Image: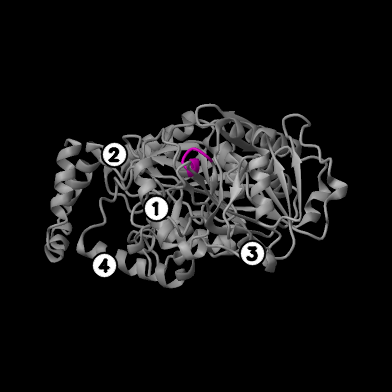
Amino acid sequence: MKKTVMRAVRAALQLVPKRLKTKLKQNERLTGFYIKSVRKSGLFFDAPTPKQTHKLYQAWLHEHHSLLGEQNNEALQSWQAIIVGSSENFSKTEQNVLALGAANVFFINDEDIGGFLPHKDNIDINLPILLLRSGDTMRAGAIAHFLDALKSASIVYSDTDEALDNGEYTAPRFLPNWNPELQLSTGYVRTGVMLKADYLERVDCLTSIAGLLVKLALSGQHLNIKHISLPLVHSCFDDYVTTRDLAVIRDEIESSGDATTTLSHDQNVNRVMWKNTSPLVSLIIPTKNGKQLVQDCVESILEKTTYSNYEILLIDNGSDEKESLDYFDYLNTLPKIRVLQYPGVFNYSAINNFGVKHAMGSVVGLVNNDIEVITPEWLTYLVGHVERESVGCVGAKLLYSDTRIQHAGVVLGYGGGAGHAHKNFPRAHSGYLKRICATNNFSAVTAACLLVKKSHFNAVNGLNENDLAVAFNDVDFCLRVEELGVRNVYCAEAELFHHESVSRGLDISQEKAARFNKELTYLKTKWSKTIENDPAYSPNLTLKRENFSVRIKEETG
């Protein structure tokens, strides 16, 4: 259907009484037709336009005015500032930080002298340091927030926006809590960083604020980094600064010797491929019948995957179609594939737990039977991440058959439970903070294509087959793995199709709806604190849609 027609249909549905709407949703055929029509129309939860964002942000600023107010500079602890960048805009930033009470101000012209710290001996090691890009300024009440946060952290950063000539503020960048993978791929924290001065004793030059954070992150030491979810810095991010920061970050990564890094010129993000020891990976694929789906999935893995050390465990959950059974018998003769029988009712968690028990690899991959490989190096990228000590679960970028985004990380709080970030966005879209095209950390990733160390899988006793037979078992699993002290990663370089739930159909029958609601209740009860404030998301962004628009007042409280 045309987009205009679907807009009219969606508007009309808002007028339908809730009781009737609930009854209509129980009609699987009607609901399936509606979903397909929405997708074909191109009517998705699109990214808000700059004009829409500006309007929403003005309302947000009005609502949070008291948190962004003036401060009493005389009552603050002494602090100092280092301004990094071009001398052209230095005076603007210098005047700002002096007005806010900086005891000392130093300047590093990163273009002329390569970031050398000429004032290192003059820096007071006992006073915190604010690092700010030349040309950027701070809100009047910013320093009080930073100094307060530094009482319980070693490094602090905040959200940012841009200041217009007419006195208005626009283009907010509402950031997640410390996100190491996003820093490596985009340098998302690049200005407005306050840290304890002794960190600068470990470096001889400061070519980039973003690069300094990467150097510290790769040093192996624990970093207590705190994020203030308020736009306390006014900054304009141009392409030159971004490209320069990414080059510095690549140098830092390469010097660590653990990865190779290339620049994606189309999206201007770093692509990091971590070295691996070529462990055996056990790819577990549950199915019931679905001969064509399984064939497309398995053949795409066998024919396109460049990583060679893997096995495929096809778990047959009571297939009864002759063509499927014949094909599975054939697969069982291939050297890389084993077909295992798991009779009984469908229980996604139990089937995968059964598969892992028979897996020979030190790394296990949970793969749906409706997955199809796109990028040949998908498994190489995923294995590189999963072998790192600091990493738990690793998920891939998954696309619907029409190439729209199906999965690019999971956000806690969507729909009151969890949902997929940027769902239905175009494949080529960069996403908010480039989080579609750049590898970054999320609290959870989907098990439709997920890699994890077998030791981590066993440490948390696998998927919860008692309480989460079908829905949210991957979210619960990822959160339990994260409690081991590791991070979960969405890997943007691993692209695959996910012809979602083709073999099972839509979960909209009364029985399925009841089961879904029961499992949603379990998730909301067990993980209420994380759902309330997902550290990989921002409390200033909406939970009504997966489009990362500014949160409106009606959503709070």
Spatial separation of the CA atoms under disc 2 and disc 3: 63 Å
- What SS does tag 1 mark? helix
Label 4 to label 1: alpha-carbon separation: 41 Å
The magenta region covers 433-438
Amino acid type of the residue that numbered disc 2 sits on in the rendered structure: Glu
Residue 437 part of the magenta segment: yes
Looking at the picture, tell me which residue is in the foreground, 1 or 157.
Answer: 157
Compared with 301, 485 (above or below) is below
- At a point 69% along the width and 48% down the height, the residue shown is 131
Of the image marks 4 and 1, the number of the one nearer the N terminus:
1
Q: What amino acid type should be assigned to the residue bearing mark 4?
A: Ala
Q: Are marks 1 and 2 in contact (CB under 8 Å)?
A: no
The residue where tag 4 is placed is 514
Q: Quickly name the residue at label 1.
A: 58
Quarter of the image containing the N terminus? top left
Residue 158, given in percent of the width and then of the height, sits at 58, 54
